[in-house]
Image (spheres, grey):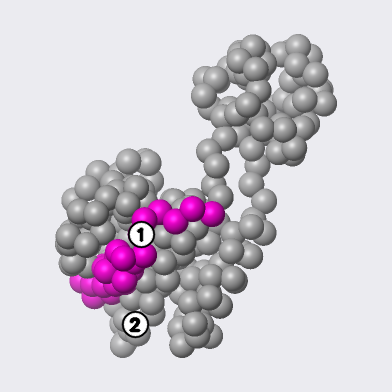
């Protein structure tokens, strides 16, 4: 795995992410939905790219306002406010969750958006009680196991199922060998490296864009 940016920015960035979540909850935002909005924002993308301006040039307060004001870049549902906040909230857990997810992203190079899909923010919050006093390596090991345990269907399989086609029917409609389709769906063959003619025949049979069949590497 390749780190997203230098360790010299790690403490500032993670602290800002923690402060962002703590502040967002304090002013009335639902933490789960706010984090989803962050993962789909330009701010998350700039951090993932290692843009120094975003890594150390702003505060957690600035991060919060960016998420509120930046349009989503991945069409994710926007944040929503908590209907009501009753009792005393433990704000430290929101800081901790934002911090450790920031460190996880930096060390793995996985996008915040993809981490959220496989390790939801609410799951991380539930880990707070047993891991917040432990070394980060314990959270990291458990987080990676959870991420890797989530099986993800390929785009080819998702589109095929949405089209109501079996593998054999797709093979006949596209004139692509059924074994090749199986190998792509099982990730034993990389569809990104397949011949353009094969992608064209599959996309035509499925009625989708050729690019929709390509896979984005998550890890």
Q: Nearer the viewer, residue 94 or 47?
A: 47
Tag 1: Cα neighbours inside 10 Å, few (<14), some, or many (≥20)? few
* Quarter of the N terminus within the rendering: bottom right
Residue at x-position 54% and y-position 47%:
218
Q: Is residue 21 above or below residue 34?
A: below
Q: Is residue 12 above or below residue 181?
A: below
Magenta stretch, main secondary structure class: helix
User: Going by the image, does 152 lie left or right of 58?
Assistant: right
User: Looking at the image, how many numbered discs can be counted on the residues?
Assistant: 2
The circle drawn on residue 92 is 2
Secondary element at tag 2? helix
Q: Nearer the viewer, residue 125 or 211?
A: 211
Q: Nearer the viewer, residue 155 or 108?
A: 108
In the picture, residue 21 is in which quadrant?
Answer: bottom left
Q: Which residues are magenta?
A: 1-28
User: Going by the image, does 170 lie left or right of 131?
Assistant: right
Residue at x-position 49% and y-position 53%:
2
In the picture, residue 180 is in which quadrant?
Answer: top right
Percent from the top left, x then y, of residue 150? 64, 56
Residue at x-position 80% and y-position 19%:
177
């Amino acid at each position: 795995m390749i780190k997203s940016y230098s360790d010299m920015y790690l403490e500032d960035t993670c602290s800002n992410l923690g402060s962002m979540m703590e502040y967002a909850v304090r002013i009335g935002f639902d933490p789960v939905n706010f984090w989803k909005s962050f993962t789909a924002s330009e701010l998350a993308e700039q951090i993932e790219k290692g843009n120094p301006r975003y890594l150390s040039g702003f505060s957690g307060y600035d991060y919060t306002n960016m998420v509120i004001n930046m349009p989503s870049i991945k069409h994710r549902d926007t944040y929503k406010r908590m209907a009501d906040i009753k009792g005393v909230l433990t704000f430290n857990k929101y800081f901790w969750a934002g911090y450790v997810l920031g460190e996880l992203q930096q060390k793995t190079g996985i996008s915040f958006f993809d981490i959220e899909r496989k390790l939801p923010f609410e799951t991380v919050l539930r880990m707070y009680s047993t891991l917040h006093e432990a070394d980060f390596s314990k959270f990291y090991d458990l987080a990676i196991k959870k991420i890797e345990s989530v099986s993800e269907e390929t785009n080819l399989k998702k589109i095929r199922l949405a089209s109501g086609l079996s593998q054999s029917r797709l093979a006949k409609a596209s004139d692509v060998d059924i074994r090749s389709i199986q190998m792509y769906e099982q990730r034993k063959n990389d569809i990104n490296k397949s011949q353009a003619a094969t992608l064209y025949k599959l996309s035509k049979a499925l009625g989708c864009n050729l690019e929709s069949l390509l896979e984005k590497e998550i890890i």
